Amino acid sequence: MSRVKAVVFDWAGTMVDFGSFAPMGVFVETFKQFGIEVSVEEARGPMGMPKRDHIAAMIRSDRIADAWTKAYDGPPSEADIDKVYDVFVPMNEKVAADYAGLVPGALETIDFLRAHSIKIGSTTGYTRSIMEHVLPVAAAQGYEPDNLVCSDDLPEGRPGPLGMYQCFVDLAVYPPSSVIKVDDTEPGILEGVAAGCLTVGVTLSGNEVGKTPEELSTMSEEENAQLRDRAAKKLKDAGADYIIDTVADLPDFLKTIW
């Protein structure tokens, strides 16, 4: 009998949206509306955090903060962060569903967990309003987790443990060591670590690699390995106990720890 009672998955870059593309253009376009040019790389940096915290991390980075200060004759304030966030959320709501295709192998992994009576939880850096657009698209493909904790459901989000604590309650599972957190971002891994869970980092489908399956298929094994290793290092540094390429690899991994 497995000692694993539940697996809690992230969403974008882990279970849906291979490469985590949905928010990228929105971050770029949102800042552009305020006269600030940002790159996709700058937008990817804080990925996994609640979206307001993500915007705050971006706007307080040295280069963007300097650009903001020059444009507005002063450093960005909390009110400025709120203004950017208020533009970002409705824009992300419009596009998130377009990128909500399941990662290849995700449904088979869910079937495996169900067959072994393992509960399926989920947390996300998306707001509840954004996830309202994603949930029906995922459900139409056969993915309906047993719970969902969004970034604005609780007083504090990632990298703190409150989202995982809510999963323990929603799923009625404990102790934390019986729950696995699967995520493609550092804040998401830190969320699991803070809650005392076993953590599994996802590399090739995630934000750090930021490639589509088609793009990866055209690259050499060496290029793929370099991308995998770079992502794995960041996730391990955040505390990931194990590393897999995508959630399709989770069943085989679970068999090694049973």
Image (cartoon, helix red, strand yellow):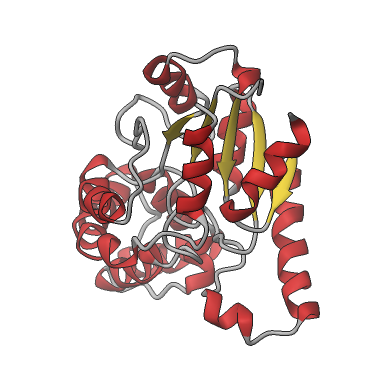
Q: Could you tell whether 230 is left or right of 153 in the image?
A: right
Q: Could you tell whether 244 is left or right of 53 in the image?
A: right
Residue 183 occupies quadrant? top right
Q: Residue at x 30, y 34 (%)?
A: 152
Tell me if residue 47 comes above or below residue 177 in the rendering.
below
Residue 169 occupies quadrant? top left
- Looking at the rendered image, the quarter that the N terminus falls into is top right
Q: Residue furthest bottom?
A: 218
- Looking at the rendered image, the quarter that the C terminus falls into is top right
Residue 177 occupies quadrant? top right
Q: Residue at x 56, y 22 (%)?
A: 5
Q: Could you tell whether 19 is left or right of 80 in the image?
A: right
Q: Residue furthest right?
A: 222
x, y (%) of residue 4?
62, 24
Specify whether residue 215 is in view: yes
Q: Residue at x 63, y 64 (%)?
A: 204
The mark total stands at 0
Q: Which residue is at the front of the view, 153 or 149?
A: 149
Q: Which residue is at the front of the view, 153 or 143?
A: 143
x, y (%) of residue 43?
47, 64
Tell me if residue 127 comes above or below residue 80 in the rendering.
above
Specify whether residue 239 is in view: no
Q: Residue at x 69, y 52 (%)?
A: 244
Tell me if residue 237 comes above or below residue 103 in the rendering.
above
